[in-house]
Amino acid sequence: MPLSPNQVELIKQLELATLVGGRYEKLRCVNASGTARRGVLSLVFQGYDRVNDCLVAMKFMDPDRLSDAYRIAAFEREPEILELVEGRKRCLQIADNLQHYDWEVTLPGAASPLKFRCAYFVTEWIEEDIDDYFFQQDTIDPAEKLRIFRDLVLSIEAIHSANICHRDLKIDNVRLKVVENEQIVVTIDFGTAAHHDTPSLSSAYARPVGASAFAPPEAFVGFSGDRKLGHLADSYALGALLFDLFNTREFRFVRGSETPFNSLLAAVGSSMAASASRDDSLKIWRNHVRQFRAQSNPPQIDGAGNSIPPSIKSLVNRVYLQLANFDFNRRTSNFSAVRNVIDSALRALANTKKQAEELKRKRRMRKQRQDKALLKQQKLDHYLTNRLGHDA
């Protein structure tokens, strides 16, 4: 996404600032490079906190959205949600609540600069991402990938335990940090997260609230803001991430090209347009998914090019199908059960490795016995040859 003049100017001003908020310095924008940026609602900076002597992440409201009431409400909700998970080690920790930066814009010929109040808040800085687990698959042990996935499930469980759904789970929003000598997964960016008890910011949602790549089917047909289904959106995203852990072909592309996903959405969406209530929408959904259940399976996780070890394919496939089910009514949110299956897969891999090592050991011992027998025979042959020659 290209940077706008306002975004360029705000980045420049913040990066040149000596001190922001009386304590933050050395700001550097981390979600913009050159003329492009990542992210929809904000500009993210790394900064140094003089008070706590540490690096922090500073999230500023997009300067192009300062008159957008919906975007402002969504941005201001994020630090409130982060406060609800404060102290949970597998959740992103807030460092400074909502603040405002006086952004100055100088117009040609104006006697004085215009001032805008740009909201921001601060969280802990977590450096290490998990990109290599997805993009360098050949170098990562399958068991290590499963352990990362298991820890990601724990992170989402921690969020759900606070009655919060993330709704934008993707590779970019997962980090690794060390707590008490233990490496754990932490999910970041709560810009589209919502608490179960808070009202929706909009009365209608035609599209997913987060990135569409890992968004569930129901998010495309009006259920994106439904608080009762938000946790199931996170389940679906976990299934998509599991697919990408063991496939070089990305879930979002395979879903669109090798399954009737888009056609099914069009069919449901056209009927949903006439819905007058949530109950009507749920009824329409049930009727449609019942008709095309056999055609609504997600992309095969063990299809062409997958890297799932044969010994755990059935277990990984079981978890995947439970998480990435097209129908949210049949999708699991029982993450304890998911972790149990992953644990079984890890044990199977350990047993397979142990068996392979035992087989290697036996082969090595057999080779040693054969070499010893051969050497003994060679010595005997040498003795007999010399003896026979002497006797002659």
Image (cartoon, rainbow, N blue to C red):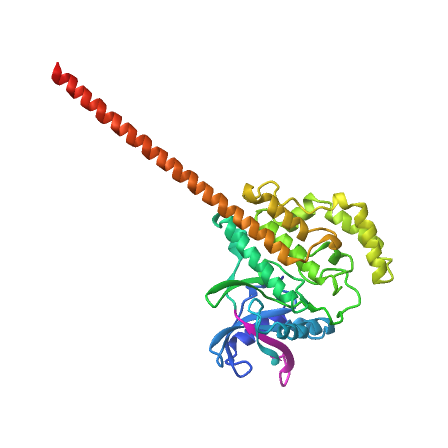
How far across and how far down the image is residue 288, in percent? 82, 50
**Number of labelled discs?**
0
Decide if residue 136 is in sight here.
no
Q: Quadrant of residue 370?
A: top left
Residue drawn 56% across the image and 50% down it: 344
Residue drawn 70% across the image and 59% down it: 232
Q: Is residue 123 rendered magenta in the image? A: yes
**Up/down of 60 relative to 216, above or below:** below
How far across and how far down the image is residue 382, in percent? 20, 23
Residue drawn 65% across the image and 51% down it: 252
Question: Does residue 292 appear left or right of residue 28 in this picture?
Answer: right
**Up/down of 239 relative to 181, above or below:** above
Residue sitting nearer the eye, 368 or 64: 368
For the C terminus, give its image quadrant: top left
Q: Is residue 112 rendered magenta in the image? A: yes
Question: Does residue 376 appear left or right of residue 118 in this picture?
Answer: left
Residue drawn 53% across the image and 46% down it: 348
How far across and how far down the image is residue 287, in percent? 83, 51
How far across and how far down the image is residue 372, in percent? 29, 32
Q: Quadrant of residue 162?
A: bottom right
**Residue lying at the far bottom of the rendered structure:** 111
**Up/down of 120 relative to 390, above or below:** below
**Up/down of 372 relative to 212, above or below:** above
For the N terminus, give its image quadrant: bottom right
Q: Which residues are magenta?
A: 104-125
